[in-house]
Structure formats: C-alpha cells, structure tokens
Amino acid sequence: QSALTQPASVSGSPGQSITISCTGTSSDVGGYNYVSWYQQHPGKAPKLILYNISSRPSGVSRRFSGSRSGNTASLTISGLQPEDEADYYCSSYTSSDASVFGLGTKVTVL
Amino acid sequence: QVQLQESGPGLVKPSETLSLTCSVSGYSISSGYYWGWIRQPPGKGPEWIGSISHSESASPNPSLKSRVTISVDTSKNQFSLRLNSVTAADTAVYYCVRDLRWNWYFDLWGRGALVIVSS
C-alpha cells in the first residue's frame, strides 16, 4: 500500500492555528474510522496524540483536534506553541488488513 | 508505568537476518493487547512491520510478510522480530510498540534501536 500524502511542511506563529492534511483513499482513510496522529520530536520516538480520527489520549492537550472529510483527515493545532515544533505523522488502517503511515509534516513555529 | 525497550545488534550484513527483542516492563504480555514492530528509515516516515497477540497470533504487514517472523515469549515478557535477507533498504530505527488492535493505533513506543545494514 502507498504511504498517505501529507504536506512536507507547515508553519505558523505562536498563538495561531494550523492544519495538517492527510490524504488517502477509500481503502484506508476514507473507509475506516481508524485514523491516528503522532508527534515526533528530533531523536525521539513518535507519541500518539489522536486516535479514531478525533479522540485524544489522556494527557494530550485539547489544542490538538482531528477531523475527516472524504478521503482526507486533518490535524489542527490551536494556539500554536514553541513546543509544538516537531514532525507529525498520520496513520490509517487499510483494507489490506495493515496499517499505513503518512510521509510526515514538519511543523515550524515562527 | 508500562515501558518497552528494544535490544539487538546495531549492525547486520546484507543477506543476513536482523534480530531484535523487546522487553516489556510494568505489564504482563500474557494479560492481553497486541505487541508490534514499526521501523523508520532515516529522514522518512514510519512503516508498520507487524504485530503479535499475547496468544501468539501473528499479523505481519503483507508487504514484508515473506521476510518477517514475530514471536512472543510470555515467560520472559518479551517479543521478538526476525527479518531475513536484509538489504541496505532495511536500515532504520526499529521501534517496538503496544498495538491497540481493535482501533488500529499504537499507544506506547520504545525508544528505538538503530539497525544499519552494511558489509
């Protein structure tokens, strides 16, 4: 299966909101509610920040929210903070009974 | 607090077999969940390799299925990965993870182990 498509980079100023898209097909993102998002700081392991499109694990800031329209899922970070500067990856279940990740988006806080 | 820790050789020769073990602390593997492996080549996105249940039901990524073996040792509270016939394309940081299979997400990750395939 092909990797999910994400913009290579997104930037914003502190306090602003940014949105990262994750585009797949009806065989993955559009076909199942099993879309998750991960935050990765340099040299660290990815950290789960959203699952089931829009659910947040305990301890994850409410500034992170998720949605989906058709074959595209989105992660919105509200009130951007310096510590949000990281790489973000989406992931989805696929009809091949597998999990596929996105290519990743680098978020820069200006 | 549940923790996962990868261990194994950091250098593997081409055509040989990559072997990694994940030790789990703070939770008994035999109690449930799936346990899996994800790798991330330098500068690229993660790739799910496969997962195994506490009852040893393995679920490999179809794209790697022919080369992957995942096993679990509940007596040692560990699970392992074997990837055979490796090439330079298998060079990556390998993470062991807890796999929430019923919703297909990964909520706990190890720190990762860099494996380089080179002669």
Image (cartoon, rainbow, N blue to C red):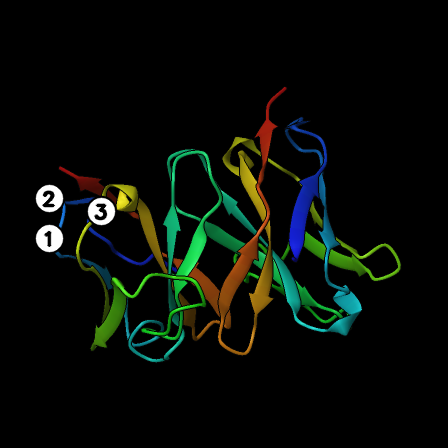
Q: Label 1's element?
A: loop
Q: Residues within 10 Å of mark 1 (few under 14, many from 20)?
A: few
Q: Nearer the viewer, residue B14 or B24?
A: B24
Is any atom of residue A52 visible in this view? Answer: yes
Q: Quadrant of the C terminus of chain B?
A: top right
Is any atom of residue B67 visible in this view? Answer: no
| Most distant residue in the top direction | B119
Q: Position of residue B76 (x, y in %)?
A: 86, 54
- Measure the alpha-carbon separation of dots 2 and 3: 8 Å
- Measure the alpha-carbon separation of dots 2 and 1: 6 Å
Q: Label 3's element?
A: loop
- Measure the alpha-carbon separation of dots 3 and 1: 9 Å
Mark 2 or mark 3, earlier in chain: 2
Q: Residue at x 71, y 30 (%)?
A: B9
Label at residue A39? none
Q: Position of residue B19 (x, y in %)?
A: 72, 41
Q: Quadrant of the N terminus of chain B?
A: bottom right
Q: Label 2's element?
A: loop
Q: Which residue is mark 1?
A: A16
Question: What type is the residue that disc 3 sits on?
Answer: Gln
Answer above or below: position of A24 versus A17: below
Image marks 2 and 1: residues in contact by CB distance under 8 Å: yes
Question: What type is the residue that disc 1 sits on?
Answer: Gln
Horizontally, residue B80 falls left or right of residue A90, namely: right
Q: Residue at x 75, y 65 (%)?
A: B29
Question: Label 3 marks which chain's residue?
Answer: A
Label at residue A81? 3
Q: Residue at x 18, y 40 (%)?
A: A109
Question: What type is the residue that disc 2 sits on?
Answer: Ser
Question: Label 1 marks which chain's residue?
Answer: A
| Most distant residue in the right direction | B75
Q: Which residue is mark 2?
A: A13
